[in-house]
Amino acid sequence: MNHIKSFFKEKGLYLFCLALVFSATAAGILALRSVVNNMSELTELRKGVLQEDSTWNQPETTVDKPATDVPEPTAAPSAAPSASPSSSGDASQSAAASAAPAATAAPSAQPAASSAFWQAKPIVEFSGAELVYNETMADWRTHNGADYAAKTGDEVTPAVGGTVTAVTEDALWGTVVEITDDNEVLWRYCGLDDAAVQPGDGVTTGSTLGKVGTIPAEAHTPSHLHVECLKGDTYQDPEGLK
């Protein structure tokens, strides 16, 4: 017993230091394990949040529009057709209209207000197969025609001559005058007021079709004339055909 007491008396300081080291080591191990566990839980939580936040669903948009108004367009228009009026008098009148510059007074059969439509670039171009956002309809769709700036009430003349094949009322496009030219291209002039023609009428570039009105499907676009061209069932760019 005395030997043991003597041993602890002589070695007591060393044993105390050893106990401190052991206690510190154990505490460090426990702290490290706690940190590792907390980081693991945090990592799992972040993965869950990222998986929830990274899912993006594009809202579905529906178009209450007849299927005939939104066909599959082609981006490559055909070669530009030339108007072929039925008589030599109409032919000379058509040639004079196409040759007259913007600043030149138009002949009496061709109002100066409407000639500006075809000399200016569209304010909204034909989009081909590309979807564009329609602010009025609040959806993405192809723009199957070209929009030409015009004031409400301006007289509208056709870009090329032909025969009136239909005059219809459409909930989205207003009064629509359809003209088929000599190259079998169907021209649709949309949103007219006071239509001045009827099916079967022959028209030239100097004929009055009606006046610029409103287009319900493009109400957010400034006052304009919406024109579409179809070759068969395929929409084409009016700029390449006028």
Image: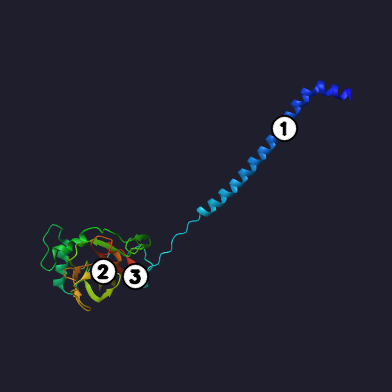
**Image-quadrant location for residue 160:** bottom left
Q: What whole-number distance in Å separates the C-alpha atoms at marks 1 and 2? A: 89 Å
Callout 3, which amino acid?
A: Asp
Q: Decide if residue 140 is on the left or right side of residue 161.
A: right
Q: Earlier in the sequence, mark 1 or mark 2?
A: 1
| Residue marked by disc 3 | 69
Q: Compared to 40, does 239 lie above or below?
A: below
Residue designated by label 2:
190
Disc 1 residue type (three-letter):
Ser
Question: What is the three-letter code of the residue carrying label 2?
Answer: Cys
Q: Is residue 116 left or right of residue 27?
A: left
Q: In which quadrant is the C terminus drawn?
A: bottom left
Front residue of 79 and 241: 241
- Circle 3: is it few (<14), some (14-19), or many (20+) Cα within 10 Å? few
The quarter holding residue 5 reads top right
Q: Which residue is identified by label 1?
A: 23
Q: Position of residue 59 (x, y in %)?
A: 43, 61
